[in-house]
Image (tube, rainbow, N blue to C red):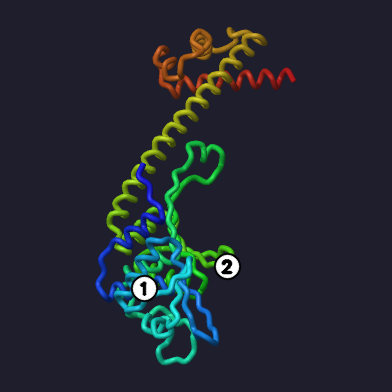
């Protein structure tokens, strides 16, 4: 079965060619989703970007250099931009007319470039997984597999803005808090596929669609098998109940106390204990429901005899 991971999503994002305006929107989404700010007397305001993986680090560094002619200083796990205030104002994260360092709402100009903006956010704080349900998950009452795409951000306001942004694109997501992060997530195949399509990751959409079909087929097969097993179990249990009722009646009052039709049905079951109800009905020349009705009467008669004896 084809599988997709969060790294697959990020790798396809980094392989896409971008126009200048798309590149700026991607950087804006990335910086907004994973930035950390600090202020010191020596260097002033500095911006840290948690790139998490090497190929994302290289991609963002190249995009920054090409878009803003900015060379980052690397300190192992982060890029630190010593002169970042201008960058943050250009990306619409700080208000260019304000003297404060307050993060403002997502600029409207990125609405037309939402595919690139969401790509950047996913590179900064996104994750994705597809899990196949265990064959015995339903029987044991456990949670099965499924699809999970999420954005994990530190700001509730950004989580709310992203939720609204995706909703306007027809994508339904949910919000929850995990530790000190706000998580915006989708867990059904339709909204996960739509989110990947929004980022214009066509190869992954096709691959996920194939995965959805495969998992759906497996679930249908397992459901059918479980249904057949349940029917077989019920049929076997019913045959045992009828056989026990017949033996009890024979022991207590004798089978000759039964009506001719019930006696005929009882003899058929005693002579062929392993046959199905359908096979016995065919041999007797009656309908399956008619034979079941006779056996129900035999079980009721045995129950009445037991109650009378008690």
Residue at 55% x, 65% y is: 177
Question: How many C-alpha atoms fall within 10 Å of the one at disc 2: few (<14), some, or many (≥20)?
Answer: few
Residue 247: x and y in percent read 61, 11
Which quadrant does the N terminus fall into? Answer: top left
Residue at 45% x, 65% y is: 125
Q: Which mark is residue 42?
A: none
- The answer to whether residue 33 is seen in the rendering is no
Q: Is residue 274 above or below residue 173?
A: above
Q: Is residue 50 above or below residue 133?
A: below
Q: CA distance from mark 1 to mark 2?
A: 24 Å
Going by the image, does 199 lie left or right of 74? Answer: left
- The answer to whether residue 196 is seen in the rendering is yes
Residue 255: x and y in percent read 59, 9
Please tell me whether mark 1 or mark 2 is closer to you in this view. Answer: 1
Going by the image, does 114 lie left or right of 275? Answer: left
Residue 12: x and y in percent read 32, 58
Q: Is residue 95 above or below residue 135?
A: below
Residue at 51% x, 73% y is: 155
Choose top left, top right, bottom left or bottom right for residue 222.
top left
Choose top left, top right, bottom left or bottom right for residue 60.
bottom left
The secondary structure type at the circle numbered 2 is: loop
Question: How many C-alpha atoms fall within 10 Å of the one at disc 1: few (<14), some, or many (≥20)?
Answer: many
Front residue of this view, candidates 61 and 12: 61
The answer to whether the residues at label 1 and label 2 have Cβ atoms under 8 Å apart is: no
Which quadrant does the C terminus fall into? Answer: top right
Task: State which tag comes first along the sequence, 1 or 2.
Answer: 1
Going by the image, does 115 lie left or right of 172? Answer: left
Residue 45: x and y in percent read 49, 83
* Residue at the spot of label 1: 27
* Residue at the spot of label 2: 180
The secondary structure type at the circle numbered 1 is: helix
Front residue of this view, candidates 4 and 31: 31
């Amino acid at each position: 079965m084809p599988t997709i991971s969060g790294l697959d999503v990020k790798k396809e994002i980094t392989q896409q060619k971008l126009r200048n305006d798309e590149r700026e929107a991607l950087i804006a989404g990335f910086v907004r989703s994973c930035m950390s700010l600090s202020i010191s007397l020596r260097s002033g305001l500095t911006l840290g970007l948690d790139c998490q993986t090497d190929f994302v680090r290289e991609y963002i560094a190249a995009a920054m250099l090409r878009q803003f002619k900015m060379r980052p200083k690397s300190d192992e796990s982060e890029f630190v931009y010593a002169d970042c205030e201008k960058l943050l104002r250009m990306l619409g994260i700080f208000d260019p007319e304000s003297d404060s360092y307050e993060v403002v709402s997502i600029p409207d100009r990125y609405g037309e470039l939402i595919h690139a903006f969401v790509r950047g956010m996913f590179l900064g704080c996104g994750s994705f997984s597809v899990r196949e349900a265990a064959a015995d998950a339903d029987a044991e009452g456990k949670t099965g597999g499924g699809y999970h795409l999420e954005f994990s951000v530190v700001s509730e306001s950004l989580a709310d803005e992203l939720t609204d942004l995706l909703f306007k694109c027809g994508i339904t997501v949910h919000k929850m808090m995990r530790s000190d992060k706000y998580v915006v997530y989708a867990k059904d195949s339709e909204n996960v596929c739509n989110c990947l399509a929004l980022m214009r990751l066509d190869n992954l959409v096709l691959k996920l669609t194939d995965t959805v079909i495969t998992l759906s087929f497996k679930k249908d097969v397992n459901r059918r098998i479980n249904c057949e097993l349940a029917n077989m179990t019920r049929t076997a249990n019913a045959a045992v109940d009828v056989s026990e009722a017949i033996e009890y009646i024979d022991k207590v009052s004798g089978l000759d106390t039964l009506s001719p039709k019930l006696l005929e049905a009882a003899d058929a079951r005693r002579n062929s204990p392993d046959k199905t109800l359908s096979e016995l009905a065919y041999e007797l020349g009656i309908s399956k429901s008619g034979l079941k009705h006779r056996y129900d009467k035999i079980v009721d008669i045995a129950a009445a005899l037991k109650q009378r004896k008690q």
